[in-house]
């Protein structure tokens, strides 16, 4: 049992961990544990892959629960930026645990994630599609540079660990939707969103300049990785085109959106530019429900005249 | 193609579809698209069964019909994210490019030879796939589509599929790196053995087959040839009087023929899983040729085996000069502009859809 807990706390996505969690249940999530979960996500945002030290079994259980609560929170928030950061950070932790493990433990974790290898003539082999799915797309892992035979690719022990890391990341990115988690978790999740640090976006002069309040708020939301409605995205995109940003700059800015999809964004921004959509008048923006200040400039682009900015 | 011709052609397509042999894996999970003015005018169609699909094709016969490489929970849903992809077949698109309207049809055998190599060397060899999970289909025009339906490949994402295409096309391969010098004096050259997998084994086997390509004079001699080959079998490429340092470069030259370059590197259908591919055994609306499922690649001859109907005749007048064409087991043409001719119907439809002739 103790062995199970040690294993589960390191590899909280495994069935052994789920088994333990099932017996505990989310009801066991105290305020302390919820706080640990929030901290775990914030650590991920800051890229702190810290390995916890445990004084006793109780602390291990708490840590395992905190992982589960964090997942529930992420499943509730559906913010892919947060989920991605979390998955990257957790999978890095897993990798550093794996580096200290015996082969049997590595194999057990790998098997859970669908990475089974076999030995032939002293070589470690994985199936080709498995190799492709769980290796990073870097020159080192290019298929063309690999020893391939009969559907199997030769890998090293270290490469297998790297594959487990990648598989764990992919596993954690696919988070199930949680519709109504316990109220305390919802509250903590909302608090987490509010505390989200703004990350540095690519510095584009036009974005740094002064903007009408409606636009300023949208820019702020995007920088905080919050979701904004479709019409707001359209308005923002047309405005950014209007003040002279390139498609690349707009797409890179929109990449902060939690459900960012580069292909769709690029198409839509390109389309708006091609169609020469005019920046909507203030009346239209009021109609969108996006007006924030009634600044009376007639058209949002007039803001710059009023503010005597030279960024246009 | 005028309205009359279109009506006639579609009625002939419809006749074919009433009995066509469709073998669409999990048809109820596929999205369909049909086209008349272009290859796909409308998509997001779905059919619960082959008979439903057949009913649609015979009643609303299109010039082109395609289905998704992907399997979806909700194939008819829009936008695409709502379809919920389950997986997608891995598709290879092989085609021949040639100048002019007709040049490509005398070169279809090149595509076929590449299909054979792709199949034997790569899909069955390196990738260890089973024949049951591979569908070879004539595209109906200038090449072939290979559908891989192996369940482990279904889950691959776009960039992972691109890796496979790069592999098959030998992109980024440096054959020189296959060789290394030993420590002994005089230095020996070590390289790939014929029993190795992948490109290493392939290049070794290719050289063993005919060493004279490396050095015509030296290996004209039976004894020298044999000694060299025996060495390669053990990975020792030093057993010849050739200047050893020349070998890697010469091998690299010969190796250029090993990848399958007619596999389309940028085929959207390979790496973009939202794309549609011509339905196997449907008709290509630019040629009236059937995108025939190929059972025996060696024996398959598209301009004979993919014809719609060999019995009926149809009279046409040519609108332009056309070169001779080997089709339907004989040679047709050349034809001059203004020439009237009674032709086998499938050949006539081919010229009409190519806009070289009109019905009379």
Image (cartoon, coloured by chain):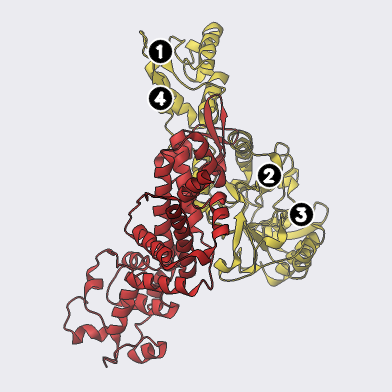
From the image, which quarter does the N terminus of chain B lie in? bottom right
Residue at the location (53% across, 68% down)?
A: A178
Q: Please tell me which residue lies in front, B335 or B147.
A: B147
Q: Is residue B45 left or right of residue A105?
A: right
Name the residue beneath numbered marker 4: B249
Task: Name which of mark 3 and mark 2 comes first in the sequence.
Answer: 2
Q: Can marks 4 and 3 be said to lie on one chain?
A: yes
Name the residue beneath numbered marker 2: B133
Q: Please tell me which residue lies in front, B337 or A163.
A: A163
- For label 1, the crowd category at 10 Å Cα-Cα, with few meaning under 14, some 14 to 19 and many 20 or more, is some
- For label 4, the crowd category at 10 Å Cα-Cα, with few meaning under 14, some 14 to 19 and many 20 or more, is few
Q: Is residue A254 above or below residue B279?
A: below
Q: Please tell me which residue lies in front, A7 or B332.
A: A7
> How far apart are the two marked residues, 1 and 2, measured between alpha carbons?
44 Å
- Image quarter for residue B183? top left
Q: Is residue A181 above or below residue B358?
A: below
Name the residue beneath numbered marker 3: B308
Q: Can marks 4 and 2 be said to lie on one chain?
A: yes
Q: Is residue A161 left or right of residue B140?
A: left
Q: Position of residue B140 (x, y in %)?
A: 66, 52
Name the residue beneath numbered marker 1: B188
State the hue of chain A: red
Residue at the location (56% across, 57% down)?
A: B273
Q: Is residue B184 above or below residue A230?
A: above
State the hue of chain B: yellow
**Whether residue B262 can be seen here:** no
């Amino acid at each position: 049992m103790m062995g199970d807990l040690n294993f589960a706390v390191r590899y909280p996505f495994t069935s052994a961990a789920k088994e333990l969690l099932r017996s505990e249940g989310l009801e066991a999530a105290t305020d302390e544990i919820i706080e640990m979960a929030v901290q775990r996500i914030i650590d991920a945002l800051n890229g702190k892959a810290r390995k916890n030290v445990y004084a006793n079994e109780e602390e291990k259980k708490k840590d395992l629960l905190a992982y589960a609560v964090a997942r529930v929170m992420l499943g509730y928030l559906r913010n892919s930026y947060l989920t991605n950061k979390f998955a990257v950070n957790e999978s890095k932790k897993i990798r550093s645990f794996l580096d200290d493990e015996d082969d049997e433990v590595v194999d057990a974790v790998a098997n859970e994630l669908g990475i089974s290898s076999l030995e032939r003539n002293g070589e470690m082999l994985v199936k080709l599609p498995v190799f492709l799915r769980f290796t990073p797309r870097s020159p080192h892992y290019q298929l063309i540079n690999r020893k391939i035979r009969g559907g199997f690719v030769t890998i090293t022990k270290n490469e297998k660990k790297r594959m487990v890391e990648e598989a764990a990341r992919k596993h954690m990115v696919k988070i199930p939707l949680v519709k109504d988690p316990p109220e305390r978790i919802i509250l903590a999740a909302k608090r987490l969103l509010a505390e989200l640090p703004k990350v540095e976006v690519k510095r584009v002069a036009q974005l740094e300049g002064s903007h009408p309040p409606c636009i300023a708020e949208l820019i702020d939301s995007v920088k905080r990785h919050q979701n904004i409605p479709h019409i707001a995205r359209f308005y923002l995109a047309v405005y950014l085109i209007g003040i002279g940003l390139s498609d690349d700059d707009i797409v890179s800015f929109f990449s902060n959106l939690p459900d960012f999809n580069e292909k769709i964004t690029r198409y839509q921004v390109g389309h708006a530019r091609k169609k020469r959509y005019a920046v909507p008048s203030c009346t239209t923006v009021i109609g969108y429900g996006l007006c924030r200040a009634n600044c009376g400039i007639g058209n949002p682009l007039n803001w710059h005249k009023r503010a005597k900015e030279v960024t246009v | 193609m005028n309205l009359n011709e279109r009506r006639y052609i579609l009625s002939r397509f419809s006749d074919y579809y009433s009995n066509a042999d469709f073998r669409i894996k999990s048809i109820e999970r596929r999205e369909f698209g049909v086209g008349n003015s272009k290859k796909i005018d409308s998509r997001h169609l779905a059919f619960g069964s082959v008979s439903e699909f057949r009913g649609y094709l015979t009643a609303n016969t299109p010039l082109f019909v395609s289905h998704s490489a992907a399997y979806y929970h909700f194939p008819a849903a829009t936008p695409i994210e709502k379809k919920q992809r389950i997986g997608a077949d891995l598709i290879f698109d092989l085609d021949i490019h040639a100048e002019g309207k007709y040049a490509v049809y005398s070169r279809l055998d090149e595509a076929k030879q590449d299909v054979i190599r792709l199949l034997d060397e790569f899909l069955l060899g390196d990738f260890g796939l089973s024949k049951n999970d591979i569908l070879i289909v004539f595209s109906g025009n200038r090449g072939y589509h290979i559908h891989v339906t192996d369940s482990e490949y279904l889950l691959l994402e776009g960039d992972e599929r691109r890796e496979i295409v790069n592999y098959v096309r030998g992109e980024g391969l440096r054959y020189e790196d296959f060789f290394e010098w030993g420590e002994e004096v005089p230095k020996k050259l070590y390289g790939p053995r014929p029993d190795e997998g992948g490109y290493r084994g392939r290049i070794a086997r290719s050289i063993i087959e005919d060493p004279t390509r490396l050095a015509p004079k030296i290996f004209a001699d039976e004894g020298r040839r044999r000694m060299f080959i025996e060495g390669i079998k053990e990975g020792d490429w030093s057993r010849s009087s050739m200047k050893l340092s020349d070998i890697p470069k010469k091998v690299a030259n010969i190796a250029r023929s090993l990848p399958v370059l007619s596999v389309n590197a940028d085929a959207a259908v390979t790496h973009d899983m939202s794309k549609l591919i011509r339905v196997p055994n449907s008709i290509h609306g630019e040629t009236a040729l059937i995108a025939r499922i190929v059972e025996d690649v060696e024996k398959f001859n598209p301009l004979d085996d993919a014809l719609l109907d060999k019995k009926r005749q149809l009279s046409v007048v040519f609108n332009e000069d056309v070169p001779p064409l080997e089709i339907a087991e004989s040679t047709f043409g050349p034809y001059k502009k203004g020439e009237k001719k009674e032709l086998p119907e499938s050949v006539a439809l081919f010229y009409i859809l190519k806009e070289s002739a009109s019905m009379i």
